[in-house]
Image (cartoon, rainbow, N blue to C red):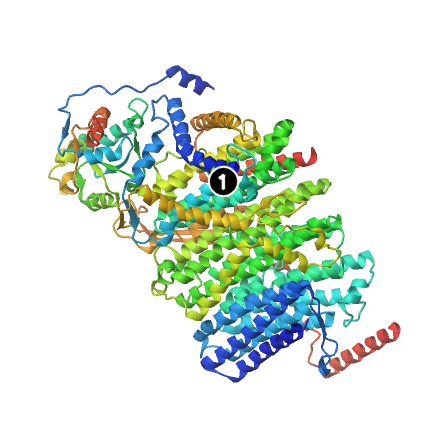
Amino acid sequence: MRLFSKIFQVGLATEPLPPGGADVVRLLHEVDARVRRLFGRAVAVRQVDAGSCNGCELEITGLTSPVYDSERFGIHFVASPRHADMLLVTGPVTRNMAVPLLKTYEATPAPKLVVAVGDCARTCGVFQGSYAVAGSVDQIIPVDVFVDGCPPEPTDILRGILAAIGRR
Amino acid sequence: MIGYVLEVAQAALALVLAPGLVGLVRWMKARLQNRRGAPAWQPYRELGKLFRKEVVVSSNASWLFRAAPFVVFASTVAVTFLVPILAVPLPFDGVGDLLVVVYLLLLGTFFLSLAGLDPGSPFGGMGASREMTVAALAEPTVALAIFALALSAGSTNLGQIVARTMTAPGAALSPGHLLAFAALFIVTLAETGRLPIDNPATHLELTMIHEAMILEYSGRYLALIEWAAAVKLLIFFSLLGNLFVPWGVSMALTPGTLVVAVASLLAKFVVLAGAVAVLETRIAKLRLFRVPELLSASFVLALLAVTSSFLLR
Amino acid sequence: MAPAPLLLAVMLAGYAAGALAALAARGALGRGLVAGCALVGALAGLLLGAVCLGAGLAPTFTASFLPLTGLALRLDGLSAFFLILIGVVGAAVAVYGFGYTEAYEGRYSLRWLGALLNVLLLSLSVQVMADNALTFLMAWEAMSLSAYLLVLTEHDQPGTVRAANWYIAITHAGFAALVAMFLLLSAGELTTSFAAMRAASLAPQVRDAAFVLALFGFGAKAGVVPLHVWLPMAHPVAPSHVSALMSGVVIKMGVYGLLRVTIDLLGGGPAWWGGLVLGLGTVSALLGVLYALMEHDLKRLLAYHSVENIGIIFIGIGAGLMFQSYGLTTLATLGIVGGLYHTINHACFKGLLFLGAGSVLHATGTRNMEEMGGLIKRMPRTAFFFLVGACAISALPPLNGFASEWLVFQTLLGGSAIPQPEVAVIMPIAVAMLALTSGLAAACFVKAFGITFLAIPRSPEAEHAHEAPRSMQVGMVSLVLLCVGLGLAPFAVVPLLGSSLAGLGGLAPTAVAFTLALPLHVPGTFGQMSAPLLALGLALLLALVPLVLRVLGADRRLRVADTWGCGRIGQTARMEYTATAFAEPLRRVFAELYRPSRDLSIDFHPASKYFVQSIEYRSEIHPWFERVLYDPLLHGLRGAATRVRRLQGGSVHLYLVYMTLALLVLLTVARWRT
Ligand code: SF4
């Protein structure tokens, strides 16, 4: 009972998405209109950790929290790439993760999108040049949108995803 | 003639309403978690999207993997013709009774489990094993709940049960009925993969039951399976709602009573969805090896239901 | 009436010719003759049964040729039904055997295999027509011995001899009980006709004793718990077509005998008879399926399922007996009809499954499921046939297993008509256990089919498996068609079964007005069901859904890719779920019953315990009644035997003393009796 009275007192915790600068999100590939129409407002996301420091994962977890609540935009996370429309890739791609990342991409049914989250995914970040790193995400699979930041804030990631499906 | 039209209309209504019902539960849960959540019609968008996507099939899979979604969907839809959703008596009432309903649903589970094993993925096998375990252990409870209902109604045919309870309203409050309701509610949670037996929102393969089986499915196959799962939820909700609290179900088949029937059906759904949502907010998932304990508790409830309606007749 | 003697003669001649031909001819010709003659015999028997059942005839035959005086045959509805059963499975097995036994050429004695198969079929057919105890017992023993020798066919394989020994020992314990039972019923004269036994009025104690003896004797043959131990040993080691015959038909003779004696000869009894049969059936059904779940030997798994299904049949019969004692003849007939319906259904799907398992064994050379997999691509037809059998045995609509289980369920629900508090507890528990059994059976067959036929092969043998030869496929197809047919036509089968019980033990089949309308509705019971409409609806929906998807323009692209395994590179069969793993949750749930022994040993690397060199895990279960019931029994027997051996001193004088003593005792007894 205490639980429910607390639920009642707190009310809605979800914050509306603050308007952010266009510079935070940079669209590298123009998402074509067909894809936009296809996904509508239902996007299943499969997250792939290709070798990140897990900082980005922490922020991604924040997306499902009541405050950011990605579900209100119809974005939900799924367990299998077979169910996914979008891959959310973090970290520099390590040598060990290069093939699995490729396999995940292959396992995803078309049409599919790839959002690379974090500076590492774009430039390999602080791990650049390491013997263990195979390259940035776009060297392994085609990327639709990069989200910058180390780590990027949940709102940025949300905007990245939304940019990818061309909602905003 | 009107009966056959109604029969088809009822099945169509079930198909159309089912995703919304799942969405409603999800939305209520989101609100209970203080989230804005997706609107109740979100599952329609998801299904629509899945139907427009490509299918990826494992190279190990056989024809069975591709046939299973259709078997699952067809057997579930077949059940919607037998369950009293809006009106009784309907012409197909004699085609199958409550036992047929249970075994038709088992047919779907059987094929889905086989399909889980087909691609050779360890997750699929795990899901199939667990799903069949839960299904088998839920079976005696279902049978006993049927027995309890049949005892007071004198029939296992659903239309009869509804009609009998309507004519003898006192039966709805008899201990046999109430206990059977509780037992069947637990079974509903187990069969439709809700908390505390299975978590419909889990992303961790090791904790999955239903999800693990369908990890390999994509596109239209996945859509069929998800849709069938939603219809299954709706079937169980209608059983709970209409067998135990039959008021509102149309018996005269006139337009007026049908409108009442639809309205009361929706009201019952909202109440049941609310109950499930509250329950899922309140409790955590049980460990897999604790699930049998819950199911045996429901079994005891059902046994008490039968003996009490036996003795109190 | 006219064709009956002719058909009988053709049947007997067919089997006899088959037996002789097997001994005379060799090679493909020999196999062909064996199969052909057995087929002729089986079809003649089938026809004979069908003609008599259809026309409601009960012809009597008395064998008057010399050495066989005292043999009497009579064909009533029940015999006709079982003749049909024997004919159906016998015909399928005969055809299948032609291809299957080819692999035996040069390894085992095909002559005896063929001859004994025909003898077995012959003795089965004679037995169900027996009209006196002598005929019955002789046929019974011929059946038991020929089955024993058939089990021994692959005598050089490990376990075969042991299995055959168990079989023959338990069968003979049962046989002894049957002899005693018939002596009780016929007052010591084994050639008394069954008609005279029916008319005899016996003291209640004698009747009770006869019932218990019959239950023991026939239960031992049927494989009812706890007398079933021989069944999962003997059925798997026999050649597969013989296994099909044994599981499909031979154990059903226990059902036949029980019905013949308790319903027909004794005319029913007090309620506890039915209760005992019902209880034994429930326990057998549940334990059978639970042990089947733990089994990874495909044929042993099927054998345990025979125990389960015999249990279901006994539930039907037990409920019938109970209703009969309360004077509810309609429900009584319904229960026994349910049992009989399940009998023929089980004969069809279990025969089919054993034949399918035989094809798998034929193709891979192993019975171990953990070494199979992927067979659905290598032997697609066998896989499909096996799938039909698996669905039928799991009681999935609209196949035959469902129809009969539904009927048994309805009978049990009818138990509410008995105003007794015990019944208020027993019937619901039986209902629940039956439901649990069928749920577990479905789980078990997901395992059996999934692990054997699906995913990727787990061994090179499975990798190189091949489809079964044509004759074996024909054998399986015939049973597949029957499984479907019997499932779709309960409205035709049930009245026929009702008429087969005509006039037995006060059962009044006319009292059961089975409607011939499409929905099967039985007055006096609860439910209504229409199998054909159900099947039609399912088929329509199955056809409609893809059509609608196409019309609505759903995406039709399909791409083949690797199985998703979290991005791992390459997939091997070792990553698949195994049969053991599949059954693990249920093993934990029922751990109290299984009491698995577990053995885990880990070898660490000498440098650090964080590096494991090898892990060995062993887990076994031992059925507890073997421990609790049979171990002390065997122990006692062995002790008694060693003590008795002392009598055998080797001295001729001693033996002379024994003989004299025995003679004296016999003479005194004989004198005293007169
Ligand atoms: S971008 Fe920053 S937070 Fe994200 S993985 Fe790289 S280092 Fe970690």
Q: Residue at 23% x, 39% y: name it.
A: A112
Residue C342 on image: x %, y %? 59, 56
- B179 up-or-down from C340: above or below: above
Residue C114 on image: x %, y %? 53, 76
Q: Is residue C635 visible?
A: no
User: Which quarter of the rendered image does ligand 1 occupy?
Assistant: top left
Q: Residue at 51% x, 62% y: name it.
A: C479
Q: Is residue C320 visible?
A: yes
Task: Please tell me which residue lies in front, B45 or C238.
Answer: B45
Based on the displayed image, in which of its 4 quarters is residue C666 positioned? bottom right
Based on the displayed image, in which of its 4 quarters is residue B204 positioned? top left
- A31 up-or-down from C500: above or below: above
Q: On the image, numbered disc 1 is attached to which residue? A: B81
- Mark 1 element type: helix
Beta carbon of the mark 1 residue lies under 8 A of ligand 1: no
Based on the displayed image, in which of its 4 quarters is residue A54 positioned? top left
How many numbered circles are shown? 1
Q: Is residue A122 left or right of residue B271?
A: left
Residue lying at the far left in this picture: please name it. Answer: A129
Residue A36 on image: x %, y %? 22, 33
Considering the image in quadrants, where does the C terminus of chain C appear? Answer: bottom right
Considering the image in quadrants, where does the N terminus of chain C appear? Answer: bottom right
Residue lying at the far front in this picture: please name it. Answer: B1
Task: Please tell me which residue lies in front, B142 or A11.
Answer: B142
Task: Please tell me which residue lies in front, C44 or C650.
Answer: C44
- Label 1 is placed on what type of residue? Phe
Q: Is residue A111 left or right of residue C277?
A: left
Q: Is residue C32 left or right of residue C520?
A: left
Q: Chain of mark 1?
A: B
- A140 up-or-down from C393: above or below: above
How dense is the environment of label 1, judged by Cα within 10 Å: few (below 14), some, or many (20 and up)? Answer: many
